[in-house]
Image: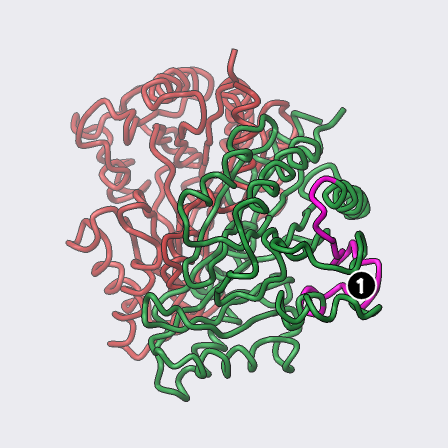
Chain colours: A green, B red
């Protein structure tokens, strides 16, 4: 049988305690069949973002184990951080990579969500392609008002979880689980400590405020660095190329006399997202991903395997 | 046994006749074990550049077959083009990719060179890592004065071929064969028809005139397009990043009030050469090739194979 590969990018609400971070990450390191590609904790976000690639089975086993560690250590009643969140294990997206369809990933997400509730008691919302209610496709709808508001509103039928009783876990809140296409987490750091600048610029680029259709974004302060950040998910990097997003932000920032200090690619990124931007800036006519040696080698190895 | 993979980038002196180009390329398409990654013919260069990846054995068989086609169709006595050349089959470099050392590639090149002369009667010069005389490391030394001058000077002991009698093949000239590291063929097209501009700018960036140490380059006219081109080989793209070369050229071009119209990556390019430039222009802090999904997948497949 051909080996199925998925990517999984669980987000945990802990970005400050190295001990807790390492304890959460440990099952991903140790589980055979689950490759820990990347993990990044951000103190200002107070959040841990993990990137995994592997077969659906081992990834789910490691996820359950890591989630139990996170749930036992993180108390949402005392959690503070710049990034929106509703739970200790905040979001778990499954992304199809090879030999697996989106429909199969949706099935994985929904089955995992039910098992996750059974084993942890944390209620689950399904989002993106795994959403059971159309309005829950958008993560921001589920996370509206964050942990603090959801704690009260979860009793409204419109905000009931998809799995579990309409009541947050007392310390771990809720978890959002879904299936989606690969996205790029892209942050632009600006040389000011005025968070208003980041918030205003985020509004001009994100789809919810009328900007680019496939950009989600918020403005937040990076207090430890004295900077502000436009923190984004580019959910379709083919339609909204990274260079276009960046140059739009740069252009808006001029209005405030604020420079782009640096940018960050958070977690994993598909090669073409970077090639498109390299092509733009370098004016490379007709660059074809097939010209990139490693991408051709990957295709050749896939052929061998099939 | 682990599969050896090399890249090979033969250059043929025919960029105008589609029939001849297709006839030359045919053996590369059809030979099992030899993958034709890319081929590009340029009318102004009057040159065909082919990119192959595969095992050393099949690649050499296909090369011999294609070379015989080229030799039977191309007459150097009547060849004209913007790019320096000494033969119908002008240059054949072997590049180590996987599970093969540079020393082994040198051995492949030298053995192939001897067989090539035996079967075609075209004298051979060895260059780069396969050079037998230190001064022949540089392709430009071997090609000095091109076909027309070499035809006369080949009788000088200093210009004798490494394989074969000191006499050019009457229609196919000579062939330069070698082993080298992966390079990037990078061209910058400028918005003027004054070839002097391209020649002057080429001088400022190439190592032979005191520019960047790992850039080889010439200025030439793209007559069919009314443009001029700085045509380069970046022989060490880690030390002389593409963005640096491009921005240096852009800066020099300002002196002449000439814009960069577009650039070209000719043939294959290693992923990191593009990632470095994307990082520069997008100010991406600490981008790691391991964050690129496809590059990680390639590593994982390699591990599986080992």
Q: Is residue A102 left or right of residue B90?
A: right
Location of the C terminus of chain A (image quadrant): top right
Return the residue nearer the eye: B179 or B296: B296
Residue A141 appears in which quarter of the rendering?
bottom right
Q: Which residue is mark 1?
A: A160
| Residue B132: x %, y % from top left | 23, 22
* Chain on which label 1 sits: A
- Could you tell me which secondary element the residue under label 1 belongs to? loop
Q: How many marks?
A: 1
Tell me the quarter of the picture where residue A27 sits: top right
Packing grade of label 1 (10 A; few <14, some 14-19, many >=20) is: many
Picture coordinates of residue B183, whole percent (x, y): 37, 41
Task: State the residue in front, B11 or A8.
Answer: A8
Q: Is any atom of residue B20 visible in this view?
A: no
Q: Is residue A247 visible?
A: yes
Residue found at the far top of this picture: B1
Q: Is residue A55 above or below residue A78?
A: above
Q: Relative to B69, is B223 above or below?
A: below
- State the image coordinates of residue A129 (x, y, percent, origin top left): 77, 56
Magenta region: which residues? Answer: A119-141
Q: Classify residue A57 by image quadrant.
A: top right
Whether residue A65 is in magenta: the answer is: no
Residue B142 appears left or right of B63: left
């Amino acid at each position: 049988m051909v080996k199925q590969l998925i990517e999984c990018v669980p987000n945990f609400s802990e970005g400050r305690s190295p001990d807790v971070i390492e304890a959460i990450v440990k099952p991903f390191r140790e589980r055979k069949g689950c490759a820990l590609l990347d993990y990044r904790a951000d103190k200002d976000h107070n959040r841990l973002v993990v990137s995994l690639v592997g077969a659906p089975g081992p990834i789910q086993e490691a996820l359950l184990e890591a989630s139990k560690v996170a749930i036992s250590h993180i108390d949402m009643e005392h959690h503070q951080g710049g990034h929106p969140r509703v739970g200790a294990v905040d979001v778990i997206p499954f992304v199809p990579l090879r030999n697996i369809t989106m429909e199969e990933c949706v099935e994985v997400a929904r089955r995992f969500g039910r098992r996750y509730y059974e084993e942890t008691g944390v209620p689950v919302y399904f989002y993106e392609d795994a959403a059971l209610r159309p309005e829950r496709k958008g993560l921001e709808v589920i996370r509206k008002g964050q942990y603090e508001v959801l704690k009260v509103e979860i009793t409204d039928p419109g905000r009931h979880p998809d799995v579990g009783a309409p009541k947050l876990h007392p310390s771990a809140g809720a978890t959002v689980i879904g299936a989606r296409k690969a996205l790029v987490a892209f942050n632009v750091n600006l040389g000011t400590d005025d968070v208003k600048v980041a918030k205003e610029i985020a509004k001009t680029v994100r789809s919810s405020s009328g900007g680019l259709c496939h950009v989600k974004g918020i403005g937040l302060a990076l207090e430890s660095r004295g900077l502000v950040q436009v923190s984004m998910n580019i959910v379709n990097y083919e339609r909204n190329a990274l260079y276009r997003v960046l140059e739009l932000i740069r252009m808006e920032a001029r209005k405030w006399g604020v420079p782009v200090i640096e940018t960050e690619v958070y977690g994993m990124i598909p090669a073409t997202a970077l090639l498109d931007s390299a092509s733009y800036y370098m004016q490379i006519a007709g660059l074809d991903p097939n010209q990139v040696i490693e991408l051709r080698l990957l295709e050749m190895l896939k052929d061998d395997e099939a």
